[in-house]
Each structure stands twice: as C-alpha cells, then as structure tokens.
Amino acid sequence: MSNVNIAPLRILVAADVLPDPNAGAAGTVVQMNLALRQIGHDVEEIWAPELGRRIRHGNLHYLLELPLALRRAMRKRLKHQRYDVVEIHQPHAYLAAADFRRLGTTGIFVNRSHGHEVRAYEVGREWRQNLQMPAQRGIRKFASDALRLLLDRQWASIAKSADAFHVSCQEDADFLVTRYQVSSERIAVISQGIPESFVDIPASPLSPARLKRLLYVGQYTFIKAPVMVAAAVSSLLTKHPDMTMTWVCAQPHHAEARQFLMPAVCDRVTFLDWMPQESLQALLDEHGIFLFPSFFEGFGKAPLEAMARGLCVVASNVGGMRDFICDGVSGRLVPAGQPEWMVQAVEWLISHPEEAVAMSQAAREAAIRHRWDGCATDLANHYRRWLITKDSSRNTEQLHISGTLPTDG
C-alpha cells in the first residue's frame, strides 16, 4: 500500500508487558509505536503497570484477570479521549472488543497477535506426541484442557467483536480465516521490523572462519525446540572439531539446555544471557550461521535480525520464516523437528563458501526491506482502510434505517 498525505491518526495501544525495547514481543510493540509516531501519528500506550495484577499464576491471570483489566483501562481512556484506532494485544481483549462495539465508538478496534496461542498449543501438543513425551494426567491435564478451552472461547468471541486483526505472518492469518471464519479483508499481515543500526551500519563480510561459528538466539521453551538445537549442534561439532557455537537464552536455563548437548562438545558451546540490541549486533557480526529450528513461530524476528547482519540462516519452515526467507537464495528452510536436515544444510554452506557469501548478501538485501518505518506505514494504511470500511458500513446501515434506500420488490 502507498502512504497518503492526510491527517494523522490518534491511536491507543494496550499490551500486558513492560515497555522493554530489548524484549521479544514487548520490543516489537515499543518499536512499532515509535515508528508510528515518527511518521506523524499520535500514539498513546497502556502497559502492564497500568493494568495491574493480583493473580500470580500466569494462565489464570491471562484468562480471568486480564480481560477485565483491559476493558477497565480502555473505558478509562475513552472517557477523556476519542481514538481513531484502539489496538489491544492478545485474545484476552475480548471483553474490551465487545464493549467497544456496544458503545458504538466511531473508531476501529484492532486485535494484535504476535503468534496465535491456540495454534501454538495445538502444534506443541502434536510435537510432544511425536517425541513420545509423557502426557499430562489427572488434575494437571484437567486444568490444562480447561484453560485451553477458555482460550479458544476468547478467540471465538474476539473474532466476532473486533473490527480487524493485526498479525505478523501469513500462517496466523490463514488460521484466523479457517478456524474462526474471519474474513481476509479484516486481517493485516504486517511483518516485524529490524533496528535501524542493523541496517545502517555495514555488515562484516562473510568469511570461511565465520561459517564455523554457529549461533542460536531464542527463549528456552519447548515450542522453540531447544532439543533440536542441541541435536544439530552436537552432530555438527562432533563432525567438525574446528566448529564452535554460541547459545543465547535466559541465564537460569543455561544448565538445563547444556544437558541436551553431547558431553564431548560442551566445551565448544558458549552460553550467554539476554543482552541489549547493540551487544546482540556485535555478537551477530562474529558468527556466520544462525540456527532456528522452532516448532512454532508467530513471526521469528531473531532470524530476520541475523539476516540483516549477513548471516546464513538455517530455520524450520514455519511462521514468518516462510514469508521472508527464499529457500536456497536468502537462507535455508528445513522441516521442523528433523535436525539431520539442519545439519545437512550447514555442511553444504561450509563446503560451498562462495555460495554462502551470495546467500549472505541476498539475506541482507531481503532483511533491509523490513524497516520499522515501512512496517508502520503499511499498518497505518490498513488502519485507514478499515476506518473507511467501517464508516461506509455505518452510513449504509443508517440509510437503511431511515428508509432512504430503495428496497426490492
């Protein structure tokens, strides 16, 4: 979509996170809001401290407490200000969406998802079965099933109430269409962006030495497939004594992640804690191949950032990676849950350094098309389209009610 020179939008964004620009989903919200402001829009924010929290249990907070908190916070803002757009993250905004519709507000209510929770649960359950992991039993299974059912109902509710949806990858958009019958016209697929410094500072040339340095950056959760990371790395480092690997995840998980590695390669794997974007950029520039074997992704910002610094990414064929990686050109896409495919892709890269350099260059060219200002412009244009659609629909309804439209027969 092309941008148009019309009045700026007044936007309210709510997310139950802390405004940390270095975090995953939270960082995405911070950067998108900043980019919207930089292209001229007025953005107000509601963060976790304003929403409050009394229930410590994560799932119970999300399912029982957060919906009321989001509705309450939105109502408070709407008493004093009119917004063109109210965008609230997660399906737990279903009460706020229904309230927004009931109030007949002139703006639009947009639901933002960084990765569809129901789809993530179902993918995770399938992979646990494939890996023959022990199934939950008794009270834990009952509680898990009950929470999943409530989450599914929340999604079904917001699918009916929200004016539009903002997702990061085509897979999530397709899931909304097939599972909840959301029309594609109500969905915007807007990729996540990369920090300006990742683009503006020239990337280091890819060398054969860097190709022997593997890197993984991701949360330590089952859905991110740390077992597959360890399997691929153990195989590669066993076959190639001159190869090393760096694993970035939260420090409390380092010991557990290390246990998945073969003992013979542990001394060549360095574990690092989360770090600011500037430090991450420097770390990327020291490595040549980025591994990312997730079972599920709502987008996959880490591999896109790696591509921006010229790394060759070997990722599972899921989430946003399918949207921004052209297999064999700007990276490699391999089947999820099959580390041997990842090993083969890495070995091909290190044995074909000239082709790896070409892939590095193509990766950077693909990544720099995902600047935050471009993402914000695309999103703002979708906002305007949805506003026009809602205004046209409201005017048509009013004409029908007033009897000014001709009727059949």
Image (cartoon, rainbow, N blue to C red):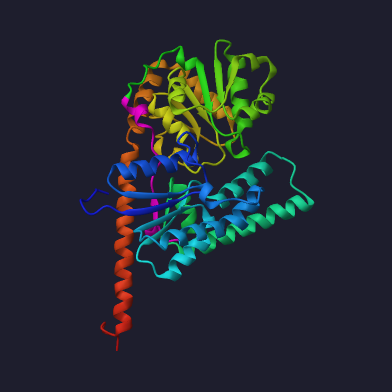
Residue sitting nearer the eye, 18 or 235: 18
Residue 280 in sight in this render: yes
Percent coordinates x, y for residue 256 in the rendering: 68, 28
Q: Is residue 366 left or right of residue 212?
A: left
Residue sitting nearer the eye, 351 or 265: 265
Percent coordinates x, y for residue 155 in the rendering: 54, 59
Q: Could you tell me how many numbered marks the image carries?
A: 0
- Tell me, yes or no, whether the highlighted magenta stretch contains residue 187: yes
Outermost residue on the bottom side: it is 409
Q: Tell me what residue is drawn at x 64 percent, y 31 percent.
A: 227
Identify the image quadrant of residue 100: bottom left
Q: Tell me what residue is drawn at x 60 percent, y 56 percent.
A: 65
Identify the image quadrant of residue 221: top right
Above-or-below relation of 251 to 75: above
Above-or-below relation of 155 to 247: below
Over which residues does the magenta segment extend?
A: 182-200
